[in-house]
Image: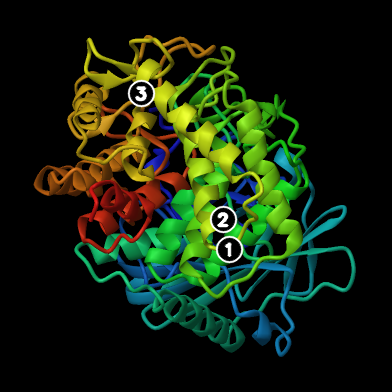
């Protein structure tokens, strides 16, 4: 780590369920894409400390920092203590329910920052350095009390009661805040047209109160009341931040190109929605009581998949657009010189068989819980076409869950998920959600897949399921077998797989995705994959090894950053968070693991396990 970049884990997230900003412990907003998650960045210093742009508020000179989210909210409070006094910084994106918007005139997007004097006097510095459209410089101008940045069709307005000096594309302010003093900095985004100015003063206080109330009312729906409720609550709040409210889609992460290995090329754009995360999403949200979010996500899945059926892409944008061309931003140096910086994702064109199981699993999970919900003929026909596609394609090699770029292979996890797709269709038929016209064909194929996986996907010599048919390499995705009901979680073959994965992929409580020498078409080197460790907790707990699972879970909880957020990966030596941040899959995996440990999980893993034991 150089002095040019802060650790990835140094950041906290704020957002409005349309976009998200990363705020460092030094009060600098170093990442923000507007107007939505996958839009061009306004601030991107986390990807280039010279060209990326930022918006910083902090004391002059030396200071100490502590920070937290206001209880049950996504409103961030950073407290700076200098030698002369104490000051508090509140950061949030105002958010309100759709009905309330009819009574309030608000900008298209807004960011609100409030400085409050707590004790003594503190000299403060503000640096407003927007670099819209991926690092472009636009000279700022002044319109009354507003600082304006224009890059067609975008207009940014920064409003404050503090005076700024303009220096080309940058604005700088210095002021002193005393105990009881207060200063606001409100940044608004609009497209060309009559712009709505952001609010400061009493109007900003109302925005803050309304936003705090929104988050607390929303999180009150959470019915989880088991151990570590604070961490579960923080995870669902983080997941709500990564939800695009107009469509119900949940992005994998709100960032692009934060590296899985410092200085490496494993830098991907995660600002899209992966179908792979679907069954995790629905199970976690519904078990925690967020049925509206789960239902909205299922609706988005059904809409997006209709655009490409009977083929499924592994990812779509937040509106269901399937075209996500990948390109490099050569003007950016990358986080810690980790190049290239990518936007778009070429993996969208990969064939990954497992997504059929994820989609049909999510739909079945939701419909079986919402027993009174009906589905229309188009959706019924879509489900049938997806199941028939599995029958046609299950024997083909695929790219696998980890999106390797070394060619398609016969991945065991993919076959298990193909089995899941057809098993779910049988349940949907029994529930009256799909016609039984193809039921015999689906059942015969499901049984054939099951037999083939047991025959070619299990290695007797090592006593474990393996990554690809007839192989001897391991893959942490095999832990999925416990949660989907392919075998009882305490089956000796499953217990052997858990033990082998821990031995060969494990580093204490952490797991790598696959063996380090495995060819994946990219230069070697990455961190341990945090979601896999939570899958291990779930697999152990489902197998009855609750004490062992609890011990690992507690260690993993200590791996979050200071405000309870996780990235995709972690360096096993230093503990530094790696990869895009915050990571939805990690937080979903945490929630599901907590639910299983607390006996609050009602998903198909336990239902199927009970059926197979005859209970």
Name the spot of residue 146 as percent of width and height, x first: 73, 70
In this view, the residue in front, 117 or 397, is: 397
On the image, numbered disc 1 is attached to which residue?
A: 432
On the image, numbered disc 2 is attached to which residue?
A: 429
Image height check: is 360 above or below 91? above
- Circle 1: element type: loop
State the residue at coordinates (58%, 63%).
Answer: 432
- The CA distance from mark 2 to mark 1 is 5 Å
- Circle 3: element type: helix
Q: Looking at the image, is mark 1 or mark 3 nearer the viewer?
A: 1
- The CA distance from mark 1 to mark 3 is 31 Å
- The CA distance from mark 3 to mark 2 is 26 Å
On the image, numbered disc 3 is attached to which residue?
A: 454
Name the spot of residue 380 as percent of width and height, x first: 69, 56
Image height check: is 369 above or below 22? below
For the N terminus, give its image quadrant: top left
State the residue at coordinates (63%, 27%).
Answer: 393
521 relative to 499 in the view: left or right? right
Nearer the N terminus, badge 3 or badge 2? 2
Q: Looking at the image, is mark 3 or mark 2 nearer the viewer?
A: 2
Name the spot of residue 167 as percent of width and height, x first: 71, 50
* Residue 262 visible somewhere in the drawing: no
Name the spot of residue 526 as percent of width and height, x first: 40, 22
Using the rendered view, name the quadrant where residue 257 is placed: top right
Contact, mark 2 vs mark 1 (Cβ under 8 Å):
yes
* Residue count near mark 2 (Cα–Cα under 10 Å), binned few <14, some 14–19, many ≥20: some
């Amino acid at each position: 780590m150089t002095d040019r970049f802060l650790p990835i884990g140094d950041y906290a997230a704020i957002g409005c369920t349309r976009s998200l900003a990363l705020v460092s412990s030094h009060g600098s907003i170093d990442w923000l894409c507007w107007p939505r998650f996958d839009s061009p960045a306004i601030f991107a210093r986390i990807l280039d400390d010279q060209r990326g742009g930022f918006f910083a508020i902090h004391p002059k000179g030396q200071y100490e920092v502590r920070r937290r989210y206001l209880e049950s909210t996504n409103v961030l409070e950073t407290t700076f203590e200098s030698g002369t006094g104490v000051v508090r910084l509140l950061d949030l994106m105002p958010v309100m329910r759709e009905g309330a918007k009819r009574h309030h005139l608000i900008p298209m997007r807004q960011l609100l920052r409030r400085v409050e004097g707590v004790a003594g006097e503190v000299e403060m510095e503000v640096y407003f350095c927007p670099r819209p459209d991926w690092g472009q410089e636009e000279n700022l101008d002044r319109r009354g009390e507003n600082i304006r940045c224009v890059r067609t069709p975008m207009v940014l307005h920064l409003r404050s009661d503090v005076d700024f000096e303009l220096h080309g594309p940058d604005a700088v302010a210095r002021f002193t805040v005393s105990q009881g003093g207060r200063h606001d900095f409100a940044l608004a985004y609009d497209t060309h047209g009559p712009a709505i100015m952001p609010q400061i003063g009493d109007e900003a206080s109302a925005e803050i109160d309304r936003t705090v109330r929104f988050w607390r009312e929303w999180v009150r729906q959470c019915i989880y009341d088991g151990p570590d409720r604070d961490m579960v609550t923080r995870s669902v709040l983080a997941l709500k931040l990564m939800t695009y409210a107009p469509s119900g889609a949940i992005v994998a992460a709100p960032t692009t190109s934060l590296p899985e290995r410092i200085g490496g090329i494993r830098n991907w754009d995660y600002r899209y929605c992966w179908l792979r995360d679907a069954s995790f999403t629905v199970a976690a949200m519904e078990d925690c009581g967020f049925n509206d979010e789960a239902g909205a996500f299922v609706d988005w899945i059904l809409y997006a998949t209709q655009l490409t059926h009977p083929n499924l892409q592994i990812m779509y944008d937040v509106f269901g657009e399937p075209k996500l061309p990948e390109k490099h931003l050569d003007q950016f140096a990358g986080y810690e010189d980790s190049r290239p910086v990518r936007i778009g994702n070429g993996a969208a064109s990969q064939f990954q068989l497992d997504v059929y199981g994820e989609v049909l699993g999510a739909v079945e999970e939701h419909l079986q819980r919402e027993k009174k919900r009906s589905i229309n003929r188009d959706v019924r026909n879509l489900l049938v076409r997806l199941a028939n596609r599995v029958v046609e394609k299950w024997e083909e090699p695929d790219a696998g869950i980890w999106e390797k770029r070394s060619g398609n292979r016969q991945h065991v996890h993919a076959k298990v998920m193909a089995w899941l797709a057809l098993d779910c269709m049988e349940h949907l038929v029994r529930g009256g959600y799909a016609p039984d016209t193809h039921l015999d064909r689906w059942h015969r194929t499901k049984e054939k897949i099951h037999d083939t996986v047991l025959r070619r996907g299990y290695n007797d010599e090592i006593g474990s399921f393996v990554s690809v048919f007839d192989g001897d390499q391991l893959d942490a995705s095999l832990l999925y077998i416990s949660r989907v009901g392919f075998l009882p979680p305490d089956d000796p073959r499953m217990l052997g797989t858990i033990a082998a994965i821990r031995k060969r992929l494990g580093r204490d409580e952490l797991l790598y995705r696959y063996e380090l020498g495995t060819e994946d078409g990219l230069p070697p080197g990455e961190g341990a994959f945090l979601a896999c460790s939570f899958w291990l907790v779930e697999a152990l707990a489902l197998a009855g090894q609750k004490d062992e699972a609890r011990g690992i879970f507690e260690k993993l909880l200590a791996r979050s950053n200071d405000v309870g957020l996780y990235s995709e990966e972690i360096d096993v030596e230093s503990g530094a968070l790696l990869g895009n941040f915050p990571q939805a899959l990690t937080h979903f995996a945490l929630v599901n693991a907590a639910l299983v440990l607390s006996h609050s999980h009602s998903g198909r893993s336990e239902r199927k396990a009970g059926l197979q034991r005859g209970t």
